[in-house]
Amino acid sequence: MSPERPGRRPRGLRGLRKPAKKRPSEAPPATPPDAPEPPQQPDGNPSSVISAALYRDGHRISTHDSLADTFRQQRALSDTLAWIGLHRPSPSELVSLASEFDLHPLAVEDAMEAHQRPKLERYGGTLFVVLRAARYLDDAEEVDFGELHVFVGRDFVITVRHGAAPDLSAVRRRMEDAPELLKRGPEAVLYAILDAVVDGYAPVVAGVQTDIDEIETEVFGGDPRVSRRIYELSREVVEFQRATRPLNGMLESLTAGFEKYAIDEELRRYLRDVADHALHTTDRVDGFRQALQDILTVNATLVNQQQNAEMRALAEAGFEQNEEIKKISSWAAILFAPTLVGTVYGMNFQNMPELHWAFGYPFAIILMAAVCTGLYVIFKRRDWL
């Protein structure tokens, strides 16, 4: 990060213990009915400032409702750290921040537009970090992604949040409960934010693992809706992978920067711990994607087997039906022959010689029997009967 400013205490963390983490809440607390109206900007629009405070030696010395008050107070006081949290700020607010803290226009443009990939960039003495936070929604059984932009300078930390996650109020409480860590400056705040984002992935990993276990049961249970669920979960895992995979390179670069600018060794250890957790998460997510691909292959195989079994059953039913049709056709032909002979002799023509022949009747009976027997033998040989 940036070199030490004159008069600031040395960044020593030896002997400190990592403060206990508080579990982030699922959603921000509801606003009480008698709560005051949110502060407004000079143009009359509601302010996006969630929290703006100044810190000295790890302790909060002032809290402000507007950016202008924060700027004015920081200019009047020396050796302070401004920690400003925003939620979906307006362009005018970001422009004022850029003017006050000399933020690079490209970074400000990214913060305005959002929908950025996770990345770490340095603009002079300012770090610009983009993170994709995630939370698992139990009721909907889906992953909700949020976007967080962090500007880190010599004496300020600015967070721009797009989405419900992460709960940075828990990060602020954690740091204020550990002034020995907070007084190490903006690098410690950046570490805490990274730690919160990476730790927030753990419930998501657990939720996705549960979904995969349920899908495996549904696949072998023959649930016809499982294919759609596999597809939807695969999309979420791909999105989760895009959010977590860049973290490994980002944290590696950030650790190298901490070493370059001689940031405290203990803080570097904390950052390496975050990197270990991030690597574990990316490995799990990669495993999820491979598992879903395997499940999709197994499901396709089972579906094909089921379709083949159905086609085989249809083919067998068609074969049996053809056999029945052959039998019916054979007997119909056999019965048609005597009917034809009887019909001819039943016409009562005057000039039929067999009518006055003494053997005419036996001849007709023998003829009908011979035709029926002949047809029966033919059909029997052809396995129609």
Image: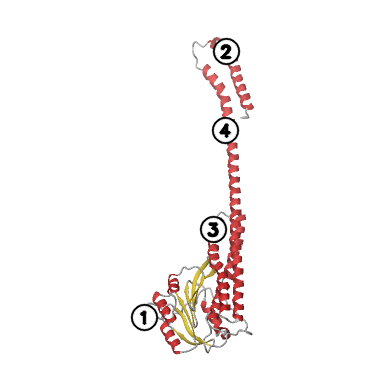
Per the image, the residue denoted by label 1 is 42
Q: Closer to the observer: label 2 or label 4? A: 4
Q: In the displayed structure, would residue 79 be above or below residue 342? A: below
Q: Closer to the observer: label 2 or label 3? A: 3
Q: Nearer the viewer, residue 83 or 215?
A: 83
Examine the rendering and report whether any part of residue 293 can be seen: yes
SS for dot 1: loop
> Which colour scheme appears in the figure?
secondary structure
Q: Closer to the observer: label 4 or label 3? A: 3
Q: CA distance from mark 3 to mark 1?
A: 48 Å
Mark found first going from the N terminus, 4 or 1: 1
Q: CA distance from mark 4 to mark 1?
A: 89 Å
Q: Closer to the observer: label 1 or label 2? A: 1
Q: In the displayed structure, would residue 236 be above or below residue 309? A: below
Per the image, the residue denoted by label 4 is 325
Mark found first going from the N terminus, 1 or 2: 1
Per the image, the residue denoted by label 2 is 360
**Callout 4 amino acid:** Ile
Contact (Cβ within 8 Å) of mark 3 with mark 1: no
**Callout 2 amino acid:** Gly
Point 58% across, 34% down: residue:
322
Per the image, the residue denoted by label 3 is 231
Percent across and percent down for residue 214 are 60, 61
Q: CA distance from mark 2 to mark 4?
A: 36 Å
Q: Residues within 10 Å of mark 2 (few under 14, many from 20)?
A: some
Q: Residues within 10 Å of mark 3 (few under 14, many from 20)?
A: some
Percent across and percent down for residue 36 are 42, 82
Mark found first going from the N terminus, 3 or 1: 1
Q: Closer to the observer: label 3 or label 1? A: 1
Q: Residues within 10 Å of mark 4 (few under 14, many from 20)?
A: few
